[in-house]
Amino acid sequence: MNKQSLIFLLLNLTGGSAVLGSYAHGLLKNTELRSELWGAVPDHIRPYYTICMFLAAIGYFFFTGYILQYVSFDTTQIFGCYNFTIINLLYAGFLIPSALWIYMTFAMISNPSVLLWIGIRIILFTVGFSSIGLFLAFFFSNFEKSSWLFYAGIAGLIPFSIQTMILDAIVWPYYFPMK
């Protein structure tokens, strides 16, 4: 196992656990504030969020599975000049900030501040741009593109990118008023 593959595995194990753990802990600790996470997102939009969240989560397993099974950590070229390090940076770009989001949002609900709101927006855009970057990396790489899992990874990256860049970074803040 080389350095990049070890980093990738550690990012996914610790980062994925941190995201899931932060959501579980945040929701269990702040039961009275759970419904406020939606802000003023209209009821008719919420089912799209829910569907997209599940598709994004399933998609994560497809594109991550593809990387684990088919991508060479040693010889990968992204955008013609970057090695696998760029994939690890993109994963860090959506896993680490995602683990912070719920705590910052509950803090914003309890004690709103402009600085906290800016931090939340930075987190959401970091996650969104990282997911779009990974989507583009799949196309502009020397990945083996003959496997069904490559196309399942692309299909998974579509709702993942829609969820993180459009719904989370753009739509949700529009309906989450800065008090």
Image: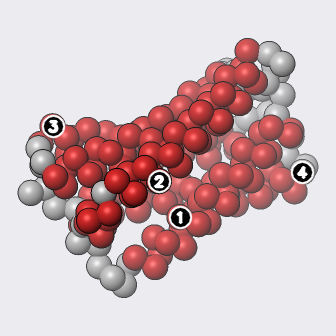
Residue found at x 49% / y 60%? 163
Is residue 114 or residue 165 the one in the foreground? 114
Q: Residue furthest bottom?
A: 44
Direction top: furthest residue: 3
Circle 2 sits on which residue? 24
Residue indicated by mark 1: 53
Can you say which quadrant of the picture contains the C terminus?
bottom left
Name the spot of residue 119 as percent of width and height, x first: 26, 38
Q: Secondary structure at mark 1?
A: helix
Considering only order in the chain, which callout, 1 or 3, is on the residue closer to the N terminus? 1
Amino acid type, callout 1: Met
- The reply to whether discs 3 and 4 touch (Cβ–Cβ < 8 Å) is no
Residue 116 quadrant:
top left
Helix or strand or loop: what does disc 4 sit on?
A: loop
Marks 4 and 2, the one that precedes in the sequence: 2
Cα separation, mark 4 vs mark 2, equals: 35 Å
User: Mark 4: which amino acid?
Assistant: Ser
Indicate whether 138 appears above or below 27. Answer: above
At horizontal 29% and vertical 79% (from top left) the residue drawn is: 42
Q: On the rendered image, what quadrant is the N terminus found in? A: top right
Mark positioned earlier in the residue sequence (2 or 1): 2
Q: Name which residue type carries label 3.
A: Leu
Q: Which residue is mark 3?
A: 115
Q: Give the alpha-carbon distance from disc 3 to disc 4, as whole Å.
A: 46 Å
Q: Which one is closest to the eye, mark 4 or mark 2?
A: 2
Residue kind at label 2, given as amino acid type:
Ala
Against 63, is 52 above or below?
below
Q: CA distance from mark 3 to mark 2?
A: 25 Å
Along the line of sight, which residue is nearer the eye, 122 or 109? 109
